[in-house]
Image: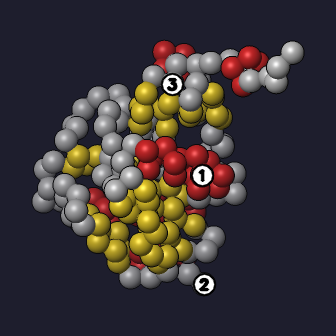
Amino acid sequence: MGAARKEDYLPYYTYDDYKAWEGDWELIDGTAYAMAPSPLFTHQSMASLLIQTIGDSIKSCKECMVVSEMDYKISDDTILRPDIALVCGQKEGSYIKKSPELIVEIVSKSSALRDEKIKYFLYENEKVPYYVLLYPEDLKAKIYKLDGNRYEKVTDILEGSFIFEDIACQAKIDFDFVFDRFRA
């Protein structure tokens, strides 16, 4: 008898299953992942500030929109829900249909493995030009830029602003605006 495989004992789900579920879920390669309960106050506040600073930076661009907690359907068996996404060339629909220009994940202890490893690989594979991991407890962000087929870390940022170049709308995040109210 051979070694057991994931396919032999775990259920396999698709987008049709996912649409019928209650609560907050992500679906990765047919495996369901329950999302943590409602994010903490700091997480929610930072998400709102990120939406505002990115939105302000692209207000003259009619091609792109900033969305929060919207499903990103990579395939029929992989649906993620990024904290923040800059989506260009799509103005309607029930989910993100193509690779966003920029994704920001606000990392918590419960989401670190998924954000830093699994989603990192999936977003890299989907050719998302920029991926930002924001750490609320450290008031720090790690910014990755797609270079060919791989992410390269551009910087760790604690203050100031960062301009995301080479995307449809040149977006900017003012990290002082996001972090200042949380500094002691």
Residue appearing at x 56%, y 33% in the figure = 28
Dot 3 amino acid type: Asp
Q: How is the image coloured?
A: secondary structure
Helix, strand or loop status at disc 3: loop
Which of the two residues, 127 or 104, is positioned nearer the viewer here? Answer: 127
Q: Which residue is mark 3?
A: 77
Residue appearing at x 62%, y 48% in the figure = 114
**Residue at the right extreme?**
1
Q: Which residue is mark 1?
A: 117
Helix, strand or loop status at disc 2: loop
Which disc is residue 184 wearing?
A: 2
Q: Earlier in the sequence, mark 3 or mark 2?
A: 3
Q: Earlier in the sequence, mark 3 or mark 1?
A: 3
Q: Can you see residue 39?
A: no
Q: Can you see residue 113?
A: yes
Dot 1 amino acid type: Lys
Query: Mark 1 and mark 2: span between their CA atoms?
Result: 30 Å
> How far across and how far down the image is residue 74, in percent?
42, 33
Q: Earlier in the sequence, mark 1 or mark 2?
A: 1
Helix, strand or loop status at disc 1: helix
